[in-house]
Amino acid sequence: MARRLTSQRGMSLIELMIAGLISLIISMVVMQLMIGSNRSNSRIDGMSQTQENASFAINWLSQKIRRGGYSPYTSVIPDRIVMDACDSQVNPPDADAYCSYDSTDSPDQLAIERVSANGTTCSGASLEDLGVDETDLVIDVFWVERDSGENDDEYDDLLKCASYTDSGSLIDSVQTLASGIEDFQVLYATSATSGFVPLDSVSDLSAVTAIRIGVLARAFSDAAQIDGSRSYIVLDGDPQLFDDGVLRQIFENTIYLMNAENVGG
């Protein structure tokens, strides 16, 4: 009985080349998927950072601005909520910086007046501990300092605040509240205006009943790159064009001043 012999042959050169090409294609596809996933995760993280930063700034500002015109006493009532416009752009800790400032090509400055009532400064320090009487008037000033130079990267645009007495004395040191806030714009509404208008369009600051604020915030890092240039416009500010690939977002809020009806009364 003859024995059947089965022969086996190895893969040819062409088959090896085809197998190698298929493996290379699979590797490239997997690599692209991983790169795309990492890029997507970076953008999600960057967007979350931007939203968190802008949300904090807007919520904090809104809470502090609502105190404008506050007084629990009938014997002392602020004659306004929004302080007069500055003669020129000046920021705390300068003695004459307890004023509001409006600009389209740089961040605005907002100064609001209230009664101490043994409350806190804009940064949360006790006014009583700082020697401010409960019936003294206090002015809280909010602004953005661009390119502060405090960091080695571009993440050095800071939202700041300071509190003054009505005589122009700085109550406490200037406080940094958030970094990465690149713009801060403010609009005002009164019974005499149609909608919200810039500071120089308000003839009677004691009649301000609502304030609209907007901030432009950037991500903590530039890891989540976006393609092309992006333009951002915060309220009445000039357009700002960026081509650095950094994620940014604009947040806005309207604050109705519940103490406005008592101001000057």
Image: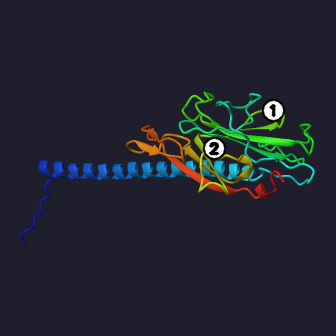
Q: Which SS class for mark 2?
A: helix
Report the quarter where the N terminus lies. Answer: bottom left
User: Looking at this view, is 31 or 53 the one in front?
Assistant: 53
In the image, what residue occupies the spot 55% across and 52% down?
48
Q: Amino acid at mark 2?
A: Leu
User: Looking at this view, is 193 or 24 the one in front?
Assistant: 193
In the image, what residue occupies the spot 44% across and 52% down?
40
Residue 93 tag number: none
Q: Quadrant of residue 87?
A: top right
Which residue position holds label 2? 199
Q: Position of residue 12 (x, y in %)?
A: 12, 51
Q: Which SS class for mark 1?
A: loop
Q: Amino acid at mark 1?
A: Gly
At label 2, counting other C-alpha atoms closer than 10 Å, the crowd grade (few under 14, some 14-19, many 20 or more) is many
Furthest toward the bottom, the residue is: 1
At label 1, counting other C-alpha atoms closer than 10 Å, the crowd grade (few under 14, some 14-19, many 20 or more) is some
